[in-house]
């Protein structure tokens, strides 16, 4: 019973962070800020949801696999985000500034 | 517990159109990539939640492992390709 309550709590926290990342992707003004919002909150929300699903399984093979998947995603998502941002910076995408107003804000 | 998983699945499904909007509308090609990456990471969660609902969570965890690995390799390849190509679409 207490494991189920802990699982519900963790999944709800993960859903909160996922919603925050979606709002960041929708509302922020340019690519770099969106990547900043997505790369971190996305991996944290995924961590919370997967751990919340692993808690009611107890000490079993499936829970171990879920923890491994969590570790993998916690490495993979920031890596992909970093590659995108570095590619954007090296290929010459200009960061958004409040003064520029060159139509990058949609 | 199953009803709660169904609710969480519905909540994650409502996030998909936001990332789809970013993937379709995004001003630069990197915005589209970010949107696609968000959709891919949400689908991993979707697979694991479906597994928890049907009781076959082991198989669905393996499926999401494969999906996550493919997503990472694809994202790295596209990122390294666009690094040399530039932002002109």
Image: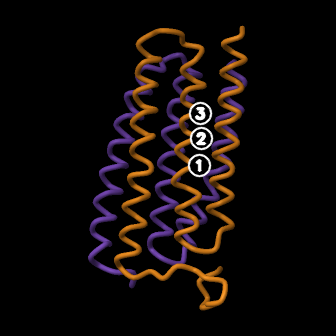
Chain colours: A orange, B purple
Q: Quadrant of the N terminus of chain A?
A: top right
Q: Which residue is identified by label 3?
A: A48
Q: CA distance from mark 2 to mark 1?
A: 6 Å
| Contact check, label 2 and label 3, Cβ < 8 Å | yes
Q: Which residue is mark 1?
A: A41
Q: Is residue A67 left or right of residue A6?
A: left
Q: Position of residue B45 (x, y in %)?
A: 53, 37
Q: Position of residue B86 (x, y in %)?
A: 34, 81
Q: Secondary structure at mark 3?
A: helix
Residue at point 55%, 60% (across, down): A36
Query: Distance between the Cα atoms at labels 2 and 3?
Result: 5 Å
Q: Residue at x 42, y 31 (%)?
A: A69
Q: Residue at x 48, y 9 (%)?
A: A59
Q: Are marks 2 and 1 in contact (CB under 8 Å)?
A: yes
- Indicate the chain on which mark 1 is placed: A
Residue at image coords 31%, 57%: B76
SS assignment at label 1:
helix
Q: Position of residue B40 (x, y in %)?
A: 47, 49
Give the letter of the chain under mark 3: A
Where on the picture, by quarter, is residue A16?
top right
- Reading the image, the residue beneath label 2 is A45
């Amino acid at each position: 019973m207490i494991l189920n309550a802990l699982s519900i709590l963790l999944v709800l926290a993960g859903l909160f962070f996922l919603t925050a990342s979606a709002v960041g992707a929708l509302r922020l003004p340019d690519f770099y800020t969106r990547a900043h919002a997505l790369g971190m909150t996305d991996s944290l929300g995924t961590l919370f949801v997967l751990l919340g699903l692993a808690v009611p399984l107890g000490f079993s093979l499936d829970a171990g696999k879920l923890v491994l998947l969590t570790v993998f995603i916690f490495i993979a998502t920031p890596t992909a985000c970093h590659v995108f941002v570095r590619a954007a910076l090296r290929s010459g995408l200009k960061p958004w500034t409040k003064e520029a107003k060159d139509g990058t804000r949609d | 517990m199953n009803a709660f998983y169904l609710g969480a699945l519905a909540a994650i499904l409502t996030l998909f159109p936001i990332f789809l909007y970013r993937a379709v509308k995004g001003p630069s090609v990197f915005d589209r990539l970010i949107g696609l990456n968000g959709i891919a990471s949400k689908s991993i969660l979707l697979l694991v939640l479906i597994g928890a609902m049907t009781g076959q969570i082991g198989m669905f965890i393996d499926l999401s492992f494969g999906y996550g690995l493919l997503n990472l390799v694809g994202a790295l390849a596209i990122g390294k390709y666009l690094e040399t190509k530039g932002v002109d679409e």
